[in-house]
Image: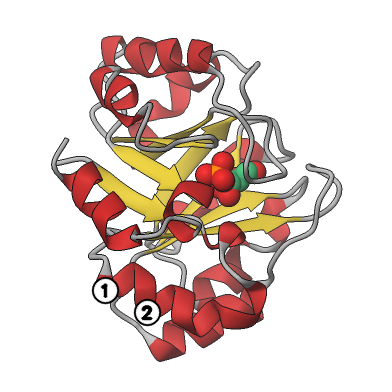
Amino acid sequence: MIKLSPSILAADPLQMGKALSLVKEAHADELHFDVMDAHFVPNLSFGPSLLAAMKKQDADVVYDVHLMLSDPIRYVEVFAEAGASIITIHQEANDFLPCLEKIRSLGLQTGASLKPATPAETLRSVLPMLDRVLLMTVEPGFGGQKLMPEVLNKARELRLMGFDGDIEADGGIGLGNMQQLADSGINVLVMGTSFFKAEDPQAVAAAVHAL
Ligand code: DX5
Ligand code: ZN
């Protein structure tokens, strides 16, 4: 089954509790939590206190934390403590390998993300440590951008390398291109705008699950 991870970056910032309820009501599989440091990417987003508040409201949700940070190793423990289920860091960030080891040592699902220009090959040696690969299908930093279809080849390459963990795609995903993503071997779809700005987010989730 293809899984859906709605990105709360696209939710109303004054209604985060409602956004969490909507993710649950829609039977989305995970909640995508984008953390930005205004250094690795040119934007700021949320910190661990919002994650902790969500975890307190609903401990059963799978919190899919995407760290767009230059120095993720300094924050992994904080986000683990706040309630992350999965922590994904960028291959392009500092201390990539020790940071992956740290996430694993905390007993969390471990993910590695690639910006659009970073080749899949850069992950070959660490694939055995990974529960998931997160392919950025836009330049990270902002929601509402257009998907770069050439990135989908990386999913095919990863499957050819024998990777059988989750492959998640993030950026510009909606009802119009989700089939193409599923066909390339991607099994987790992040949707920000196309979920939270939809007239019927529950129908969007149902369409993903029907793929
Ligand atoms: C971008 C973020 C995405 C973003 C996707 O840097 O990592 O998770 O919220 O938003 P949409 O689905 O609107 O492109
Ligand atoms: Zn993200």
Dots 2 and 1: beta carbons under 8 Å? yes
As drawn, the label of residue 25 is 1
Residue at 79%, 42% (x, y): give it.
Answer: 40
Q: Quadrant of the N terminus?
A: top left
Question: In which quarter of the view is residue 146 placed?
Answer: top right
Mark 2 Cα-neighbour bin, 10 Å: few <14, some 14–19, many ≥20:
some
Q: Amino acid at mark 2?
A: Ser
Q: Quadrant of the C terminus?
A: top left
Q: Is 4 left, or right, of 198 in this rendering?
A: left
- Measure the C-alpha gap from mark 2 to mark 1: 6 Å
Q: Amino acid at mark 1?
A: Glu
Q: Is 35 left, or right, of 121 in this rendering?
A: right
Residue at 62%, 18% (x, y): give it.
Answer: 118
Secondary structure under badge 2? helix
Residue placed under numbered mark 2 in the picture: 21
Residue 31 vertical placement versus 153 (above, below): below
